[in-house]
Image (cartoon, helix red, strand yellow):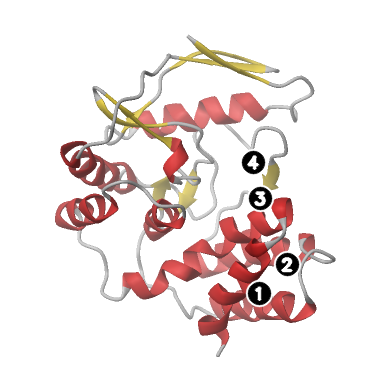
């Protein structure tokens, strides 16, 4: 058993994470760490033993993640079954509230629940021109610039490489910020900090459930929120990284 604990965690923090794990598990796709117990200040999970990643495990991850996404959600922004209200994103020591919602279109969700709250929170942490560009992208998203008719996917929501545990049974997902969203968001997160065998994951995913043309050009759009959160928490080069992501989206 592995216990996550934090005294004074936001009310419901661990119960929300447990609900997200169970929601992802119910999809019958990617492997998800098992929840053993949950309380106000702890979450008990099965102990996972890490092994080196392999191409075969990466291929299986790509195919199974496509099935997880295909399980869907009721709307863009909805929290996982078993939880109501906002969720959280970021490190255990300093999680940020991630607004929930029930948007019909992804662009509306992106603007209202991600980019505009992020711009507000970044006041004083990022230059005005970066904040202005963030709001311009939010306006374009709300106007439907990147809406494509994709149904809401069942997302892990924080799928960077550190939240993929490579085990003898295969890649296993941990530490979600689960919600209904656009499936390209999880794939963009996998690319953000470098996942081993990423090309094999993406090729297997595309073979299982083909991605729309041009998805690689949209990776930066889907990385705005996580990079912006890193700019808020850690500053430094993440602010310039955010500016570089915004530039092609507003020019």
Residue 229 position by quadrant: bottom right
**Residue with the mark numbered 3:** 99
Mark 4 → mark 3, Cα distance in angstroms:
8 Å
**Does residue 105 appear in this view?**
no
Marks 2 and 1, the one that precedes in the sequence:
2
Marks 2 and 4, the one that precedes in the sequence:
4
Outermost residue on the right side: it is: 124
**Residue found at x 70% / y 76%:** 130
Marks 4 and 3, the one that precedes in the sequence:
4
Q: Secondary structure at mark 3?
A: loop
**Residue found at x 64% / y 38%:** 91
**Residue with the mark numbered 4:** 88
Residue 210 as seen in the image, left or right of residue 222: left
Residue 102's spot in the image, x, y percent? Answer: 56, 53
Nearest to viewer (mark 3 / mark 1): 1
**Residue with the mark numbered 1:** 134
- Looking at the image, do the residues carrying marks 2 and 1 touch, with CB atoms under 8 Å apart? yes
Residue 104 as seen in the image, left or right of residue 173: right
Mark 3 → mark 2, Cα distance in angstroms:
14 Å
Q: Secondary structure at mark 1?
A: helix
């Amino acid at each position: 058993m592995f216990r996550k604990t934090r005294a004074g965690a936001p009310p419901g923090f661990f119960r929300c994470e447990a609900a997200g794990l169970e929601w992802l598990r119910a999809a019958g796709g990617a492997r998800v760490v098992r929840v053993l117990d949950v309380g106000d200040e702890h979450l008990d999970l099965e102990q996972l033993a890490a092994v080196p990643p392999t191409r075969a495990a990466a291929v299986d991850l790509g195919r199974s993640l496509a099935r997880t996404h295909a399980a869907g959600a009721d709307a863009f922004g909805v929290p996982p079954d078993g939880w109501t209200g906002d969720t959280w994103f970021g490190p255990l020591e300093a999680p940020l509230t991630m607004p929930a919602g029930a948007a019909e279109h992804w662009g509306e969700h992106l603007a209202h629940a991600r980019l505009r709250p992020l711009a507000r929170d970044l006041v004083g942490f990022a230059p005005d021109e970066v904040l202005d560009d963030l709001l311009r992208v939010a306006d374009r998203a709300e106007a439907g610039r990147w809406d494509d008719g994709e149904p809401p996917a069942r997302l892990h929501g924080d799928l960077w490489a550190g939240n993929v545990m490579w085990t003898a049974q295969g890649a296993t997902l941990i530490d979600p910020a689960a919600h209904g969203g656009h499936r390209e968001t999880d794939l963009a997160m996998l690319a953000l900090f470098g996942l081993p065998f990423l090309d094999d994951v993406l090729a297997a995913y595309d073979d299982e459930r083909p991605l729309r043309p041009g998805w690689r050009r949209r990776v930066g759009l889907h990385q705005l929120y996580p990079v912006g959160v890193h700019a808020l928490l850690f500053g430094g080069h993440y602010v310039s990284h955010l500016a570089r992501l915004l530039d092609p989206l507003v020019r």
